[in-house]
Structures are given as structure tokens and as C-alpha cells.
Amino acid sequence: AMMQNVLNLTDTAANRVKSLIAKSGDDSVQGLRVGVKQGGCSGMEYFVEYASEKSAMEEEVLDKGVRIFIEPAAFMFLLGSTMDYHEDRLTSGFTFENPNEKAKCGCGQSVAF
């Protein structure tokens, strides 16, 4: 049986990751790293940054041809989530939809990148 991905990417998110990596102009960039930091109304906020290598404790997700590295602290929050990319006139950023997260207030979910 296939192990369920920690994180699944929508096509939109995957394409956005690919274009960001291409735009970085940095050959060492392999993918994006997702982590959490204190902040937001639920006490946690996701952040996304360029990643050139996987750290020892990180989880690596390969989906739709892109690599996402997940920091250990973010792992339990992102387990089973779907990463999407959302863009409208006011905001753009990655969003994380987690079916296990019942009480969600909506803020601190999107990351401008």
C-alpha cells in the first residue's frame, strides 16, 4: 500500500513552486521548506522559504514533481494537509487545508511568497 503523503499539493501549488524555484535563479534551490512559527490567531503561523537541502530531521515530500521539506515542528500540523496556492486582488500565498484541524479561524494559514 502507498504510504499517504504527509502533504499533498494541488496543481496550482505545484506549478507555483516550480515557477518560484525557476525564478530564484539559484541552482542550489531544490524546493521549498514549510515551517511554523509563533503568531497568528491560533498561536501558530506557517511560513514558506527556499530550501537548498533537507535537514536531518525534516520530512521530504515529493508531489507533482516538486520537493517540499517539512520542519519537524510543522510535521504534526501539516499531516494530511493539502497545500494550495491562492491569488486574488488583495492577497496571494500558499494555504494549508487540514481536514484534522476542526477549529480553524482562517488567519495565519496563508503565506505570502
Image (cartoon, helix red, strand yellow):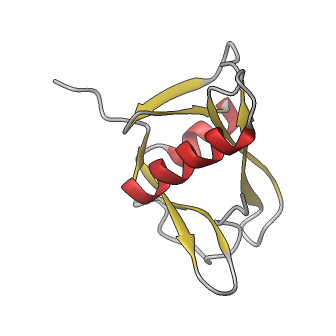
Task: Report the residue that reaches farthest toward the top.
Answer: 56
- Using the image, determine if residue 113 lies above or below residue 51: below
- Name the residue at 65% across, 19% down: 54
- Name the residue at 74% across, 58% down: 45
Q: Quadrant of the N terminus?
A: top left
- Using the image, determine if residue 42 lies above or below residue 58: below
- Name the residue at 77% across, 62% down: 43
- Using the image, determine if residue 32 lies above or below residue 26: below
Relative image position of residue 82 (x, y in whole percent): 43, 54
Nearer-the-camera pick, 4 or 11: 11
Nearer-the-camera pick, 71 or 88: 88
Q: Quadrant of the C terminus?
A: bottom right
User: Dividing the picture into quarters, in which one does residue 10 lie?
Assistant: bottom left
Relative image position of residue 108 (x, y in whole percent): 71, 67
Relative image position of residue 63 (x, y in whole percent): 39, 36
Q: How many numbered marks does the figure carry?
A: 0
- Name the residue at 61% across, 76% down: 106
